[in-house]
Image: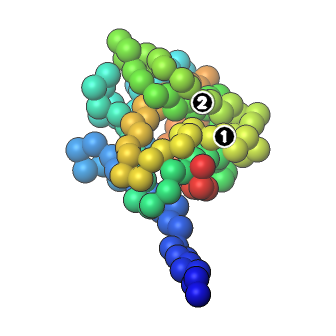
């Protein structure tokens, strides 16, 4: 008699995010109220502003969207797969002040278990309001 053996292994789409130098978020500190392609703090061509690690056991896609509107005057947030000469390069994904909370974009595709994806970030703004504003940039995962 033949018996069927079935394996029901849980699927994990867990991931984690790390930042350079003990940072806990992506921060921009432009020197004036109008800025173009302002790099995130502590970001260099060799050091990304954030790193995503697949902590699960299947390939994952990572999607990103803002949960709140940009502050007044901020016109763009861009995240890219590379930086060259301090400028965005590689494949870039961007949100503008018109699609910041409506454009859910896949910023990482088919990241293997234990794989890492470095991401660099830039922002632009015109006559931005002064002060400190925090936004939620939501990352979600799904099996690839």
CA gap, disc 2 and disc 1:
7 Å
What residue would you read off at disc 1? 105
What residue would you read off at disc 2? 93
- SS for dot 2: strand
Could you tell whether 74 is left or right of 29 in the image?
right
Q: Of all residues shown, which one is farthest toward the front?
A: 1
Image spot of residue 134 (x, y percent): 52, 51
Callout 2–callout 1 Cβ contact below 8 Å: yes
Q: Nearer the viewer, residue 143 or 18?
A: 143
Q: Label 1 crowding class (10 Å Cα cut-off): few <14, some 14-19, many 20+? A: some
| Residue in the picture at 52% in, 18% down | 36
Relative to 86, say whether 141 is above or below. below
Q: Nearer the viewer, residue 81 or 142?
A: 142
- SS for dot 1: strand
| Residue in the picture at 47% in, 17% down | 89
Q: Quadrant of residue 116?
A: top left
Name the quadrant of the N terminus.
bottom right
| Residue in the picture at 60% in, 49% down | 144
Could you tell whether 15 is left or right of 46 in the image?
right
| Residue in the picture at 43% in, 31% down | 120
Q: Nearer the viewer, residue 140 or 40?
A: 140
Relative to 42, say whether 69 is above or below. below
Q: Label 2 crowding class (10 Å Cα cut-off): few <14, some 14-19, many 20+? A: some
Q: Is residue 136 visible?
A: no
């Amino acid at each position: 008699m033949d018996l069927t053996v079935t394996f029901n292994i849980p699927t994990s789409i867990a991931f984690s995010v790390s930042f350079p130098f003990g940072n806990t978020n992506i921060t921009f500190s432009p020197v004036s109220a109008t800025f173009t392609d302002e790099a995130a703090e502590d970001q260099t061509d060799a050091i990304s502003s954030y790193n995503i690690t697949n902590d699960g056991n299947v390939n994952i896609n990572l999607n990103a969207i803002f949960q709140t509107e940009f502050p007044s005057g901020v016109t763009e947030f861009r995240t890219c797969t590379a930086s060259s000469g301090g400028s965005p390069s590689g494949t870039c994904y961007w949100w503008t002040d018109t699609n910041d909370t409506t454009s859910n974009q896949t910023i990482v595709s088919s990241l293997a278990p234990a794989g890492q994806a470095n991401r660099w970030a830039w922002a632009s703004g015109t006559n931005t309001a002064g002060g400190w504003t925090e936004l939620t940039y939501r990352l979600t995962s799904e099996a690839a």
